[in-house]
Image (cartoon, rainbow, N blue to C red):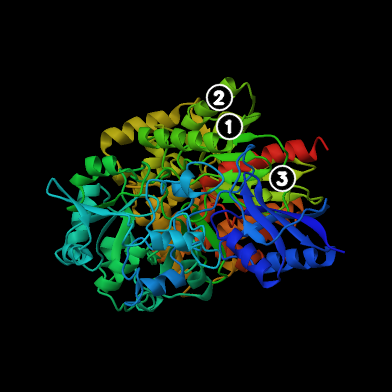
Amino acid sequence: MITSYYLHIEGIVQGVGFRPFVYKMAQEQKLKGWVNNTTDGVHIYLNTDKVTATVFLEKLLNNLPPLAHVTQSKILKVPYKQFDDFKIVHSESKSKPKLLLTPDAAICDDCKNELHNADDRRYQYPFITCTNCGPRYSIVNNLPYDRPFTTMESFKMCDVCQNEYDNPLERRHYSQTNSCPDCKIEMQLFEDGNLQKNFTDLDYIIQKWEEGKIVAIKGIGGYLLTCDATNSEAIKTLRERKKRPTKPFALMYRDCQMITGDVFLSVAEKKELTSTYAPIVLLETKAIISNQLPLGLINNKLSRIGIMLPYTPLYELLLTKFGKPIIATSANITDSTIIYTDNKALEKLSAIADVILLNNREILLPQDDGVIQFTRKHQQKITLRRSRGKAPTYINPELKVPKETVFAAGAMLKSVFGLLNMQNIYVSQYMGNTASYDAQLNYEHTFTHFADIFSTEIDTVVIDKHPDYFATRFGKELALKSDARLLELQHHKAHFYSVLGENNLLDSKENILGVIWDGTGLGDDQNIWGGEFFMYSNYNIERVSHIDEFDFILGDKMPKEPKISALAIAHNIKGADKYLKNKFTQIEWTVYQKLLSKKDNLKSTSMGRFFDAVSSILLDFDVHSFEAEASMQLENVASQYYYANSMTLADSYLKTDILPTNFVESLLESIFNDLDKDINRQCIAARFHTTLVDYIIRIAEKFKVTKIAFSGGVFQNALLVDLVLEFMNEKYDLYFQNEFSPNDEGIPFGQLMYFTNKKVNLES
């Protein structure tokens, strides 16, 4: 007997060709009914029996379009309704959106093939897209995701594009970004104060690179500053103009074949590079490289370089024509959000770039390129920046989340916020350091965009305990304005909740040790924490241990100058002065000694500052030019030694079974002893890392735990993570951040998980 069945599908199902996909499947099976988008997903009506409807849904879920991801689906028998055929009906937007936003996607293989096919009508068209690729999140004004609700609204399709758009059997059916050379997105070229409209000569950009010029190019999420990566003078000029003396630059290569001429590329790394979100991947350089790269100028002697593939058709065309790698770094002023509006590009980038390549497709939300790396031996993935192609949607079907609308304000250095809305989780793209006013404006802009799209009515706001963070103040004001409940969560506990939530450990019946190591976070005792051990038990977090306290002096100056950390941590150690005193002027030495003699100094347990201190002592790395620079250099020299030599836990500086009560002082005494013996400093750096893992093992043994979770910015250190896996994997269950970064970008997700834990587990 023929009946009617209703299918409701939620997840990333809009802007991914889902309706044409359903249409084709219904046509193949000769089913009648309809499919449409609404603000809560995709809805399907079918004239059929239960068995056929069930098989249809199963086939649908097992053969999804490339960008689709289903989080929930249901099938219901409904009153019979007669249909003569199967149709795609127009989207509806009658209720509050309950949709996952579709991230931007790198150019797909089909579009890439058409781009290079001289017989195709979109041959060398720099803005070719289809339902399987192109901008989504960065151009959406409202939901559901349809062309009138995007920045493509102002572009009228030509007859051929309109026919593709209207034809359910075409790959570009309902492709909201559809265009071609006859109804094109236009480029403009700005040079020497003149704006050339309808610019099409990409060979001119190649010429500028070959001349050693810097070219700013508008991409999906903002502008990139580019130049020839083999031209030392061009790179020096870019560093001078951008005021970026040493921070590594990312590179863009034409393809994987070119990449493997310069770096090692594992299967996992290649998979990330060629994925739909096409991040920057940090890759180990070879001893002999094929391309003539001035590595010292690019990555300041680090062993890895950040590489990405062309993720837009424009970059694909340019890199194919150029035949060499380019520098491709975010166009921003230090710590600020990537520049993404044309007016600001003309205003701010003219002093940096010789040429600016614009286009008239508006970007609504700024997004930097994502950054990830893998540990060398165990290939553990570490996300360093979650942005373009990933943000803002997070999918984890195993997480139970409450129905309330919750805003998580995040921290400061890595400006990211979180939103729990209609039981969907969103974590925004990275927006810079909110110490920058520009980053603050973009934080507000992005939140307002979210609030408008989802028509949010905030029930609860979760903030960091640090009162001076911009995000904390923003959260407090939002709670007051929304008449919402305000919750505070200590910084490192948020890190712990983040790794617990990502690994579905909130309901764990066993105790879990949290090793949370980072640079700075206000502790419950009003001191600066950062070398913490927590215990998660019975849905609560308790601080159970930490590294030794030391004086935190000179405020923001201390994180910027590793030599101050070295002095603060080591000044009482016998024989330390000969390694410290020459780092300071006589006046500095006298003033700082007086400061350290005071009894009421702020105290710190920061592992990040401990890394700074050791970097200063071992490498004479005394002043940062960017965040964590010293620690990166320490990891680099330690890695060179560790991977070239067979090291074990026997190389730890902890030589007795007794865990020292003064761990930091004991470790530094051992380091100074080795320096006095003129031991290889790379070896000392490696032993420092090995000792930290030994220390974790001693703490785990003390508390008799086998489950250990790791988070905090220190665990961006790939060597440290590799050592943890090498020495602890057999005996312990180890949990790391994967989708989210262990740095402060993971804080808002942790704040959401804190509320989830509090609501779902403690009140159920």
Amino acid at dot 1 = Ile
- Which mark sits nearer the N-terminus, 1 or 2? 1
Screen quadrant of the N terminus: bottom right
- Which mark sits nearer the N-terminus, 1 or 3? 1
- Which mark sits nearer the N-terminus, 3 or 2? 2
In this view of the protein, which residue sits in the foreground, 54 or 190?
A: 54
Amino acid at dot 2 = Lys
Circles 3 and 2 in contact, beta carbons < 8 Å: no
Q: Residues within 10 Å of mark 3 (few under 14, many from 20)?
A: many
Task: Using residue 266 as the reference point, say whether residue 22 is left or right of it.
Answer: right
In this view of the protein, which residue sits in the foreground, 63 or 36?
A: 36
Task: Using residue 306 as the reference point, say whether residue 189 is left or right of it.
Answer: left
Pinpoint residue 745: horizontal percent, then vertical percent: 52, 46
Circles 1 and 2 in contact, beta carbons < 8 Å: yes
Q: Residues within 10 Å of mark 2 (few under 14, many from 20)?
A: many
Screen quadrant of the C terminus: top right
Task: Using residue 200 as the reference point, say whether residue 57 is left or right of it.
Answer: right
| Mark 1 and mark 3: Cα distance apart in space | 22 Å
Element type where label 2 sits in the image: helix
Q: Residue at x 44, y 35 (%)?
A: 445
Front disc: 3 or 2: 2
Amino acid at dot 3 = Met
Q: Residue at x 50, y 67 (%)?
A: 171
Pinpoint residue 439: horizontal percent, then vertical percent: 40, 37
In this view of the protein, which residue sits in the foreground, 663 or 638?
A: 638
Front disc: 1 or 3: 1
Please, which residue is most extreme toward the right here?
A: 1
